[in-house]
Amino acid sequence: MTLQNRDSGDSSVPLLEVEDLQVEFHTRAGVLKAVDGVSFSVDHRETLAVLGESGSGKSVTAQTIMGILDMPPAVIAGGAVRYRGTDLLGLSPPERRAIRGQKISMIFQDALSALNPVFSVGWQIAEMFRVHRGMSRREAKKRAIELMERVHIPAAAKRVDDFPHQFSGGMRQRIMIAMAIALDPEVLIADEPTTALDVTVQAQIMELLAELQEESGMGLILITHDLGVVADIADRTAVMYAGRVMEQAGVFDAYAAPAHPYTKGLLESIPRLDQKGGDLFSIPGTPPDLLHRPSGCAFRPRCRFRTDECLTEDPPLHDIGGGRGSACHHYQEVLDDAER
Amino acid sequence: MSEQLAQVSTSTRPRGLWDDAWDELKGRPIFWISSVLILLFILMAAFPTLFTRVDPHVADLSRSMEEPSAEHWFGLDRQGRDVFARTIHGARASIIVGLAATLVTTLIGGLLGILAAYLGGWADTLISRLGEILLGLPFVLGAIIILTTFAGAQSGAGPALVITLVVGTLTLLSWPLVARIARSAAYSVKHADYVQAARALGAGPFRIMFRHLLPNVMAPVIVYGSLMVATFISAEATLSFLGVGLRPPVVSWGVAISEAGDYIRQAFFLTAFPTAFLCVTVLAFVMLGDAIRDALDPKLR
C-alpha cells in the first residue's frame, strides 16, 4: 500500500466497515449475544469513538475486527468486517495475519500485561521490524529507538534495553502505541487505552494518538467508556448498549443534543462542578443479562421515555437526518427534551 | 529532566530473571561444590586418560580379585583388570546417558507440552492421554520390556547403539513428566494479554509458541531437567545392573556393579568403588538441581 492511493483511494468504499456484525458466545447456560447487529465505519483521518459500559460488546467487536477472538466459545453468527471492501471474516488465517499489525493494529487497556515481561521494550518493538520487514537486528533496533522518540519517550536510546516493569504506566502505553504503529497501519483500534492511567497522563496519551493520526492519516477507532476522554479528538461516536449500537452521531451533535435516552443518561452522569454538594445523577437499574434479554428495546427497563411500544417493538437504528442514527422509538421526544 | 532520567536508567542496568538467578547461585557454596564435582566427572568422561594411563580392557587373569595396593589403587576385578581405570572410564557412559537422556527428554517433553497448551482441543487430549498411559507404566518394568524387546534381539549390538537404545527408552518413559510441566506453564500464559497483543500485532503460531510461551516454560523445565540428570544416571546403573541396559564390553558403573555384585562378600571393594563414584555423581547433580531450583523458583523453597 503506497501513500498515494492511501488518501486518494476509492472514496465510495470505506477504509474499514463493520456491517450487521453478530457475535454469540455458546455457554452452558445458553446462547449469549454479545454483539447483535453492530454496524459502523471509519475512514482515513477519521476518529470513531465506540462508547459503552462494561459488557456492552465493544471489546468483543474490536477483537472480532482483529480476528483474535477465541473461537470457541465465541461464534460469529453473521455480518461482515470489510477492509477496503474485502470481507476479513472470509479470509484464511494466514491472510488475516498479513493484515493484523500491518494494516489494522491494536493497543490494549493495560500496557503492563500487554507487553511480554521477559523481553526488553526495544527488543519487542524491534521484533515488529524483524518479523514483518525482515530487517537486521541492528537496523531494527535503530528503528525502535526512532519510534520510541516518535512517541515521546525521554532518553529513548538509553531506555531501549529496559524491561516493561521499569517504565511508568504512561510510558508503557506509549511503548504499546509504538509497537502498534510500527508498521504504519491504516487503522488503529485503541481498546480503552487510558483506563489504567491517571487523568493527566490520559490527556497526554490522547494527544499523542491525535498527533500520530495527524502525521499518518490513519483511521482511529477509540473504544472507551469515558465520554470526557473522547470529546476532544473523536469525530463521530457510536454508543453501544447490550451488544447494539444505540446511537450514531457526530461527537458535537451527540453531546449537544443526544437522540437516545441512553446517551442522554450517560451525559447526565458526568459530574459537573455546579453539582457540588448535590446528588450525582445515575441511570437507574443495571445493564440487562444478555442471556435473558428483555423483550422489545433492551434499554426499556431503565428508560424514562418508555411506552408500550417499547415493550413489543425492538427499535431499529432510525436514520434521523444529519448523518445521525438512533435506535429509539421516541428519538424526537429525546431530542426535544434536550433543547428545553 | 531527561538527563536525570538517563542517569537513573544507566545506573540501574536492566535485570532479568536469569541475572537474579545467577546472583542467587553465586552466593551458595552448595552450587560451587556440586559444580566442581560435576566438572570433574565431565572431565573424567571426556578425557579419562588424564586420570589414568592404564587400559581398562587389559586383563591379567593370574591376579584376579587382587586387593587395592599402591600399584592398583582400587584393586583388580575378577578378570584381573584395573578397577581404578575401569571406574574412571566408566564415567563416560553414565554421564553421556544422563546428559543425553535429559537433553532429549526436555526437548521432546517441552515441545509437546507447549504444543498441547497452544493447540488445545484434540491435540492436547492426544498428547496428555498418551503421556498418562506411559506414566502409568512402572518405570523399571517398562524399561525392561522395551530393552529386552529391542536390544535383546541384537546381542551383538555395538556400544553406540546400546547407549542410544537406553537413552531412547529413558526418554520415552520420561517425556510426559516434562510435557506436563511445560503444558501447565505454557497454558498459564496462553491467555495473557501480551500473547493476545502479539496476535493482534500479527504474530504467527510459531512466534507465539517460541517467543512468548517458551520463555515462561524454560525456568520450570530447567529446574526439573537439572534434577532429572541424577535420576537418569541412577536409572542407567539400575538397568545395567539388571542386565538389560549397557553391558560388557561397554565400561560403565552400572556394568561394574553388576559384575561385582556376585562377589560382594569375597571382594567388597569391587562393588564399593564404582558405587561410591555413582553416588557422588548423583549427589552432585541433585545438589546442583536443588541450587538451580532455589534460584529460579524461589516459591518452591
Image: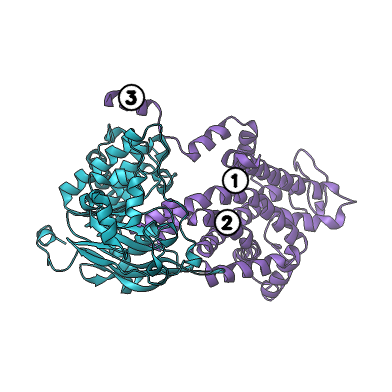
Give the amino acid type for the residue marked by disc 2 in the picture: Ser
Element type where label 1 sits in the image: helix
Chain of the residue under label 1: B
Residue A28 percent across, percent down from the top left: 57, 69
Whether residue A21 can be seen here: yes
Give the mark toward the camera: 1 or 2.
Answer: 2
Nearer the N terminus, badge 3 or badge 2? 3
Residue at 28% x, 36% y is A153
CB atoms of marks 1 and 2 within 8 Å: no
Q: Is residue A53 left or right of residue B145?
A: left
- Label 2, on which residue? B184
Residue at 11% x, 59% y is A7
Residue A90 percent across, percent down from the top left: 32, 74
Judged from this view, the residue extending furthest toward the right is: B265
Q: Are marks 3 and 2 on the same chain?
A: yes
Image position of B85 with respect to A242: above or below: above
Colour purple maps to chain: B
Nearer the N terminus, badge 1 or badge 2? 1
Q: Is residue A91 left or right of residue B86?
A: left
Q: Which mark is residue B7?
A: 3
Q: Are marks 1 and 3 on the same chain?
A: yes
Image position of A97 with respect to A232: above or below: below
The colour with which the image depicts chain A is cyan
Give the amino acid type for the residue marked by disc 1 in the picture: Ile
Within 10 angstroms of label 1, few (less than 14), some, or many (20 or more) residues?
some
Chain of the residue under label 2: B
Element type where label 2 sits in the image: helix
Give the mark toward the camera: 1 or 3.
Answer: 3
- Label 1, on which residue? B42
Q: Is residue B249 left or right of residue A282?
A: right
